[in-house]
Image (cartoon, rainbow, N blue to C red):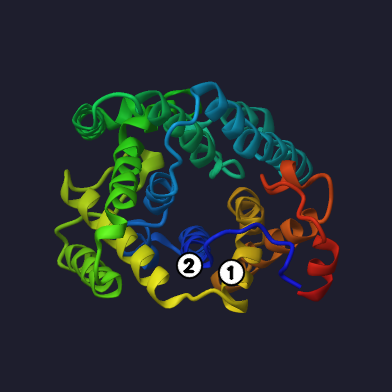
Amino acid sequence: MFDQLPDRSGAIDLVRLLAVAAIVAGHAFTKDVTQAWLYSWHVAVFFILTGYLWKPGRMLRTEVSRRALSLGRPYLAAFAVLTAVLLLVKPVDALHTIAGGVEGGRFAQMPYVTLWFVSALFFTAVVFRAMERLPYAVQWGIGIAGALAAWAWSGPLSRTPLGIGYIATCLLYLLVGDALRRARDRIAMPLVSGVVALTVGAVLVAVGAAAPLDIKLGDDGTPAVSALASSAISIGLILVAESVVRPGRFARACTLLALPLLTVVLLHPLVLWLGAPPWAQFALGILVPLALGLVALRTPLSPWITGQTRVPGARAIGSAV
């Protein structure tokens, strides 16, 4: 039943599943429960994965076009759905909330709270593609300069339209992922290396050396140390997953469940309005939009709902899960 799925790494898709679950948990539970251990890596890992899966040599206009389709269409569709629900459920002062959603970034409040991630990923990927032909040392120089600017002027940068200023923070994580991609074949013991990286990141968080991140609010944590911790945890997750997840049914199941994860990221805030206990919000926040996304994969609306092309034969797949 998994034969028609795209050829993707089940290990990387497992990391995606864990990260999205952490994002939903970060919204469903109070920050004092989740901030230290989840906010330290659950968004940064997606930018690191973007760098890790980077395909060098693509034309800039092709990058813009592809990102506009894979990220832009779900962004617009989710905005329409979120706005419709907002007008039905909380019409009072809805226009002010919608205006914040249009402006995006830090200005986007419930239910638009996750839109910033999509626009930030789009702009950061485009900038990274534009930098690609620069000398590697220059790329890192730009990334480090951006991170320093983000630590120094986090407030103004986080208040830019559509969160374009988040590039200053997120570009460094793409560079980290790209560096892992370049070095991956030379890592002789990926499982051991992954466990060590995870341990280093976890210790930095546990002892309070690395403050948790909240990129949307312009909080980049402890200068340098928080970036090191989030990178170590993300790299550790990638290396461990690639070491333990083998091709087979489990890997394909991870891929199937990961295909509509953008739907979960964009639409799970609606569940937070239910006023249910945190564990119920967490479960529903994952399961409801995930089910919607799995159904959408079977239809021509899939590129708008999930950001994925319609999966051939997905009708059989959808009926089997």
Residue 147 is at least partly visible in this image: yes
Instruction: Tell me the number on the disc at residue 11.
Output: 2
Camera-nearest residue between 195 and 117? 195
Tell me which residue sits at (35%, 57%) in the image: 41
What element does badge 2 sit on? helix
Decide which of tag 1 and tag 2 comes sooner along the chain: 2
Q: Which mark is residue 207?
A: none
Task: Report which quarter residue 295 is drawn in.
Answer: bottom right
- Dot 1: few (<14), some (14–19), or many (≥20) neighbours within 10 Å? many
The residue nearer to you, when weighing 233 against 77, is: 233
Identify residue for label 1. Answer: 254
Disc 2 marks which amino acid?
A: Ala
Q: Residues within 10 Å of mark 2 (few under 14, many from 20)?
A: many
Residue drawn at point x = 70 percent, y = 42 percent: 82
The amino acid type, in three-letter code, at marker 1 is: Cys
Residue 278: x percent and y percent?
A: 55, 69
Quadrant occupied by the N terminus: bottom right
Residue at 73%, 41% in the rendered image: 304
Q: Which residue is rendered at x = 26% and y = 73% of the image? A: 195
Quadrant in which residue 71 is drawn: top right
- Quick check: 105 left or right of 94? left
Q: Is residue 304 above or below residue 277?
A: above
Q: Do tag 1 and tag 2 residues touch (Cβ < 8 Å)? A: yes
- Secondary structure, mark 1, is helix
Please say whether residue 36 is visible from this viewpoint.
no
- Relative to residue 70, is residue 220 drawn left or right? left
How far from the left and from the top, in percent, is residue 252?
62, 70
Looking at the picture, tell me which residue is in the foreground, 279 or 316.
Answer: 316
